[in-house]
Amino acid sequence: MKITILYGSATGNAEHIAKDLAKNINESKITPPSAFRTADVMELNMFKRKKLMESWVVKPSPSDGNAMKKHALIIVTSTTGNGDAPENASRFVRFLKKPPPSTLTSSCISAPTKPLEHVAYSVLALGDTNYDQFCETGRNIDKKLNAWGAKRGMELVCADEATGLEGSVEPWLDDVLGRLEKACLEEDVVEEEKKDEEEKLSGEMKEKLSVSNDKAATKKEETSEKTATTLPTKNVTPAKPATFPPTTTTSKTTTTSPPTKSPTPLYILYGSATGNAEHIAKDLAATYEGYLQNPSFLGYFPSVVCCDLNAYKKKCLDAWSSPPCEENESVKHGVIIVCSTTGNADAPENSDRFIRWMKRKTTDASQPFKHCAYAVMGLGDTNYDVFCAMGHLIDKRLGDLGGTRALKGVMADEATGLEETVEPWVGSVIGKLASVCKGEGQESVAKVEVEQSTDVEKTVAASTPAVTAPDIATAATAAVPKKLKEPSPSSVEEKEMDAEETVIPTASTTSSSVGVSTVRALLSLSSNTESLPTIPNSSLPSMVSSLSSCQLINEETMKRPRGESIADNMTISSTSSGFLYTAAKPYESSILDARYLTMTDVKCATKITAAASSLGEMDDEQLMGAMKMYEEHFPLADISSAIISEQQRIQYDKNGKRVIELTLALPDDFTLEYQPGDSVGLIVPNSPAPTQFILSMLQKSHGIVPTQKISVDAAHPITVEEAVRTTVDLCCTMKKRWLFVLSMYATDPEEERALRLLSSKETTASVDLFQTYIEDQHRTVVDILQEFPSCQSITLEDLLGCLPAIPPRYYSVCSSPLHDRQSSGNGNDGHYHLKVAFSVVDYLTPALPEDGKTHRRRMGGVATRRLECVGSPFLSNQASSESDSKNLPTTTAVQIFPKPTHDFRLPSNMSTPLILIGPGTGIAPFIGFLSHRQAQLASLDSTQAAEMTSEGTWRGGYELEQNELALSKGDVKGLNLAVDYMSKHQQVGDIDLFFGCRYSDGYDYLYQKELEEFKKDGILTNLYTAFSREEGSKEKMYVQTLMQKNVAQCGKRLLEMIIEKEASVYICGDGNAMGKDVQEAIVSLLAGYFCDKGVCNDMEEGRVRGAAHVDQMKTSGRFVLDIWS
């Protein structure tokens, strides 16, 4: 029996889902088997060409045992713009909006009002809750099909791309074929059956398939969890397995029963840029290893191998190349991959070699994953144009390379919070993977009854009852809070009670800690009479295991059998990016120069420089003193307050907007090269104040001195101070699972209650405590330890284990290797260098009641404040001609490494026109673009070239020996490019630049002088500026506003460049809103253009065509974004 699957897709998601489902139907890979044996899949706009309407008005004829009384139809469609249909669905949508045409009447129906009465259907709508008209196209189609007489076989499901589609799509895929089959078999559904269906949707599936008008991030089954003493008990029915079964089949008939124990380890690999993917992978590995320590635990995998993706060849590939069980080819190796996406669809550095190997055509022939079953989680950020590109790529390619997909890839959004997606996946992935690895298939997963499991390992031998696994914290860490009790598996009643709630002793007196007082104030509780709510364990996070093991080093532990030292076991990852310097092995650079790009006064920088007791690096005391001086010199205040004047408001606003350009030295041997558009990563330690607090706390609570040696994860010994200062991020905003860890150490009952309340998955009706108290205030682990002092007994191992690594800070390069090579002056001393520009992060958090008063916290960037302080001598020197360069520090070390981009590059064809859109510090890479273009054109001046030849800075056009050139290979390539194009008499394309800032008085008009020079020299064709904080102006003018308001000048020129001159568009800046708003403005301009030209009948159709035009530009590399959140 046949089913028709139609899709409307703009970005490819809807098309992928539809075609994937059709493929599984046609290849009989649906589990459990479906009555539908064949599937036709096509775009919605193909409905007329394929004469679908004409076939649907006729009742299906019973033939070859076909008992279906209705045609089966599935529609998967996205919504583009703000409620528009995708271009390949627009005709179908317009057709449905009209009354049913009389031409569809036939002998089978008496009137045209119900032409689709012989159709049963289901609609899956994809949308984005960042837009007002969420899933509008899918909603309209679902409504119209029903109005035309079609029978709704399954309720409409809306999936939100902003928070990840999988939570809604997978349950829909699990149920849709079965529900449609039932609807097609029955011509009418009686009221009792309708009630049965509604009851069937209750519970877990109703939760998963419910359509939210406000947010479509459907939640997966909640996992009831115990405290760290016993394994949690699941309170809901296990989710159905994913629809997508293994993508490969075995060639031999199974000759032996599946093994009860895997012959090989569980492989968990990660690709991580900021540490999140690594954290998830290691947490999963540590948790499972903790279970394995319990002798009664019957987990399938005997051990775990956890490593970065680039270690695949060294640690995994040999094992994967052979079947784990020669006698049974259905048995597979288990592989889990967690990978993030950096930049705009780039692979993290520690996964790029794996990605390149996986993408090679030669890899396809070997089918390296044919003996593997896999599960993939991708981490991404919907602020970026391409969401979870690496996760989607890996999930697809592993299947192409012979792998068996154990469950559909899951994509988590860092912009909206990872926990909601990560925790359900972590809770079920190993169990589902184990079932497939044993060759049982996914159907068996639903049959396994595990009453006491976190779902981390819910599959054991089919004949073996489930057992209680050991406590996570006990198994995964060496040091456990003493208050935690050992599990007691003999008492079911005790375990059930413990899973529901941990009894916390009632405090005789109310806690006086700042944290408890603030939480009580937020909940409007009386200071003496009301207790904080008790939170059941089922509402607490599950990911609480330690990621690191640390060992204090003394003379005895330094000695190992056979003369080994701890350093001998240290694994050093080789560089895989093709660059000598990486995040793991950065270049020790130095600051050559610094200047404010804003009109910031340098009195404070001068004062700090004068107070410096010695040249060179600042120590902790000097650094903290400098930070305090900057805070006092640049006071901040609530600019919305009515008690300050307009002039004060502007000044306070400017105080918090300081932008610095930093010049950094590069190695003279060209071992660190870059191109305009690249970024550079900076490695910075924790700020001195939190570092000193933690060191003091460890010494006071555990007697651990800063100079004591430790080994983290059996690596080379380092001091405790180095570990605290450089290995974990003390300054990041707390996560719920970290708060839960701290709650287990709290000795004060009220503090424990408050921390459990803050870490709860649920929110109170009156206030979201975690959002208000933690996220809005950006509270760190040090803040929590200070405000809840009874948890300061936390061990060093748990502290290092629960916190992420310090992430690199990335900044766009604002220079050109051609333009700045061997430049003199500005304190550079002829060094090979690069420049970056950044805003100093300095702001006030929202007001919060604290100690009976309203309080705002002043927050500063860990990297940017440090760079401002250590760069003070340069900042003061550039503003004063009387400064003596001899007083500048001899060196200020900064660790850096290159982060090249693949897309954000100048076109190789210099005749391609450019549209550069960069408000604020988004202008930085475009300064590099313009400088590079200027250097390329300057190389064509033979007089200038002759002069530069004598100076050893050749700029093209002369025969010189390679050792006579002070140029890298990249420089020569760029210069020859200019010579080649001009020799062919090609014109250089126009360059238009849109820049936005706050004030037109020049305060934050970054690179104003340089931009005006570029315009004067003809490098820049047009310069458009927008100012959003003009004094006396009520309207805020942003670059996107300028495009739409000034259509006669800006809008018309944009259309000319995009349509007629086929310009390439580059957008750089804050991605929270700007990137999407600019794209929306361009789509609106294109819509008006298409309507004016008569190509489209109305603006609705024009917007669809405009969005499709932008998508096509992106595909061809003519619309590129570099945004950050």
Image (cartoon, rainbow, N blue to C red):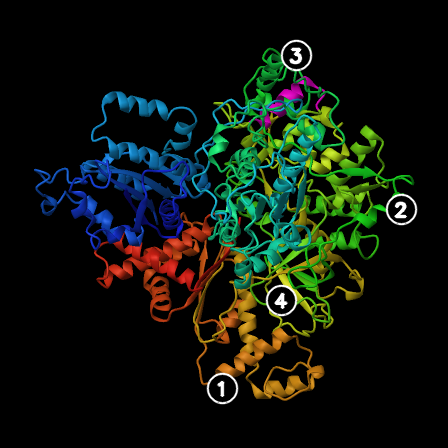
- Where is residue 734? Give x, y as percent: 62, 35
Seen from the viewer's position, the closer of residues 442 and 202 is: 442
Residue position marked by numbered label 1 in the rendering = 983
Seen from the viewer's position, the closer of residues 115 and 162 is: 115
Q: What's the mark number on residue 1114? A: none
Q: Is residue 758 magenta?
A: yes
Residue position marked by numbered label 2 in the rendering = 562
Q: What's the mark number on residue 506? A: 3
Measured in 3D between alpha carbons, the distance from the residue under mark 3 to the one under mark 4, in whole angstroms, is: 61 Å
Measured in 3D between alpha carbons, the distance from the residue under mark 1 to the one under mark 3, in whole angstroms, is: 85 Å
Measured in 3D between alpha carbons, the distance from the residue under mark 1 to the one under mark 4, in whole angstroms, is: 26 Å
- Disc 3 is placed on an element classified as loop
- Where is residue 837? Give x, y as percent: 61, 59
Which image quarter: residue 601?
Answer: bottom right
Q: Residues within 10 Å of mark 3 (few under 14, many from 20)?
A: few
Kind of residue indicated by mark 2: Arg
Please tell me whether residue 346 is drawn above or below residue 853 in the rendered image: below
Select label 4 or label 2 by which is in front.
2
Seen from the viewer's position, the closer of residues 144 and 870 is: 144
The tag earlier along the polypeptide, 4 or 2, is 2
- Disc 1 is placed on an element classified as helix
**Which segment did they paint magenta?**
746-760
